[in-house]
Amino acid sequence: MAVAAFRGLLNGEHCGDKRMERKPSGKRRVFVQTETGCVLAMELDRSDNAHTVKRKLQLALDIPTEERSLIYGDTVFKNDLSSVRNDSPLLLTRNFMHRSSSTPCLSPTGKDLQPRDQSGPIEILGYSSHFSRTKQLVKEIVMAMKNGVDPIPVHSGLGGAYYFRNCQGENVAIVKPTDEEPYAPNNPKGFVGKALGQPGLKRSVRVGETGFREVAAYLLDYDHFADVPCTALVKVTHTIFNINDGVNGNKNQERKQVSKIASLQQFIPHNFDASDHGTSSFPVAAVHRIGILDIRILNTDRHAGNLLVRKFNGTGSFGQVELVPIDHGLCLPENLEDPYFEWIHWPQASIPFSEDELDYINHLDPFRDSEMLRMELPMIREACLRVLILCTIFLKEAAAFGLCLAEIGEMMSREFRGHEEEPSELELICIKARRLLGESKMLCNDVKEGDTQEFHFSTDYGEQEFDSTLDMEEKLATKSFKCSRAENSRDSLFRVNESTEEEEEVESERNVIAVRVDGSGDSVRYRSPSFSRLPTLLKNMSISERSWQHEGRMKKSGYLGGASSGNRSVNEQVPASTSFVKLGDMKEEEWVQFLDHFQKFLYRAFMNSKSGQKQKQRLGTSCRF
Ligand SMILES: Nc1ncnc2c1ncn2[C@@H]1O[C@H](COP(=O)(O)OP(=O)(O)OP(=O)(O)O)[C@@H](O)[C@H]1O
């Protein structure tokens, strides 16, 4: 009966076929994933809305749906589904987010395994021309499966992963289902206890959301600069996958065809990983290129095991090797986090960037990158895109200033004093920029209705209204502000600029980078902050010595003690990672203004970093076990 509800709603388009964004009939196929990982392909009619879809799901899966919502990244669908694109993975999740993390999400009795749908065994979710290599891989894998060559589980790592093979039995891809990640409901290695969408191994990366990050890293790696293997998001159906049963997270021994949303990455034959090999033979260019990527995406998990080492031409002659970066599931966190850069103390990272590398960095455009990701991976959260923008600006300015990879990595990494974690230089700059944003907002809010649209205030008179903690350079930076209310903006777009000559010059370099249509249908134009120049106003100001300490005094005690079998309590084992700076909670106009402030503080911070470099104490926060 459940299957009947879907008759005619599913189709079997082959993964290699050219798929249109929306079929002429107005029908779209979506993949709905429940919190327990179960995936169902559905075809939506023009008339379908969130209620009708939930009703169909209830019938098909025999699960209650009243207290649940359909979500897609940041979007919660109340009713209208017209913005959902063909082949989107939607998540059906409970409305209340105060689920006890000690109570594993209920996967009642294995009953909610989805009925067989008619889509192909592997479907690529996305249309990018970048996935042409992946399409080829998928064809090879499907052919092999038809010939009885099945995938095999990967035993290393914390998450569920499977090598998919070609007809010759060679590994050609590694597939990681999103519901088998560490702590996800169907993790096969005993690390269970959370529902999809809850904070995961890193608090700023939700359970079930590492797959699209792997794809994002691949898509951002323009011209295969860092050599990230081709990666796509897929819906894949096989009996090999793991399903846990009931509240205990025990493995369901019954092998059935199940569909999963997963990342599929090209398998790269290799000789070692970087933890098994002396680092001195690693080419400077490879380390730089991987480091540049890691900085852009704020990789929190670049441990040595995530760098595959391939002997050059397979012979190893002259000790030459190639490095291939893998496992980007913990990049682009939703907040600034402590990154983990294994390369930070390798000598190669202290060698200045080459001209080619500087040229590549110079041509990076974080706003174009975030637009591209929004198009290719619509489920990506805005907060992650802001991290990408911020870190790319930081990289561009730092490289233009003359910092090397190691120095940039140092500035992004947190320090440990005693057992206390302190914000990184990058986070300190953001804290200052946010404080300044708060102060300028307060001042702008003081303007009464009916006042002129343009007004001035001076430091002398504004000072009393500032937070007493505002330090010297912030006071100077806020000196003589001119707040102008952007005209025609329904959502009160404010721009705060210094009324200095430098400001005039900088202002003239700014371009409109995006036109956003707000809820009222009005368009709001955003400017791109200048990358090439820092306002000279702040060059002589000092960023105060780091005095700020996290009030909670979080102790960093590392992650899990081991990776053997047996279920683990999430509460005991989720790391206490701190968020010093949030980027996602700013409104669009605040974010633009924040970026302006952020850039103004960079120059001095770079000067300080050059003059006072000291070795930081790090405990290491990668997720390698
Ligand atoms: N593209 C690839 N090509 C070849 N081997 C790979 C590839 N990706 C992963 N592997 C292998 O699979 C193993 C597990 O993969 P991966 O590290 O991505 O999983 P994980 O569960 O995220 O691991 P970890 O817990 O170490 O971060 C790796 O140790 C590596 O040997």
Image (tube, rainbow, N blue to C red):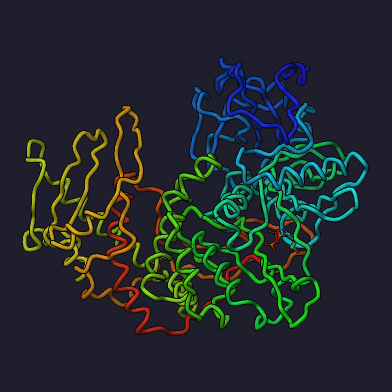
Q: In the rendering, at what x and y percent does residue 376 appear?
A: 55, 42
Which quadrant holds the C terminus?
A: bottom right
For residue 406, side relative to residue 549 (left or right):
right
Residue drawn at the location 33% of the way across and 79% of the way down: 608
Question: Can residue 420 be seen by looking at this rendering?
Answer: no
Query: Toward which corner of the image does residue 237 lie, by quadrant?
Result: top right
Q: Quadrant of ligand 1?
A: bottom right
- Judged left or right of residue 524, residue 171 is right
Residue drawn where x is 54% and y is 76% of the image: 344
Report whether 334 appears left or right of 436: right
Residue drawn at (45%, 69%) of the image:
358
Quarter holding the N terminus?
top right
**Residue 214 visible in the shown view:** yes
Q: Quadrant of residue 447?
A: top left
Task: Residue 269 in the image: state x and y as whole percent.
Answer: 78, 63
Q: How many marks overall?
A: 0
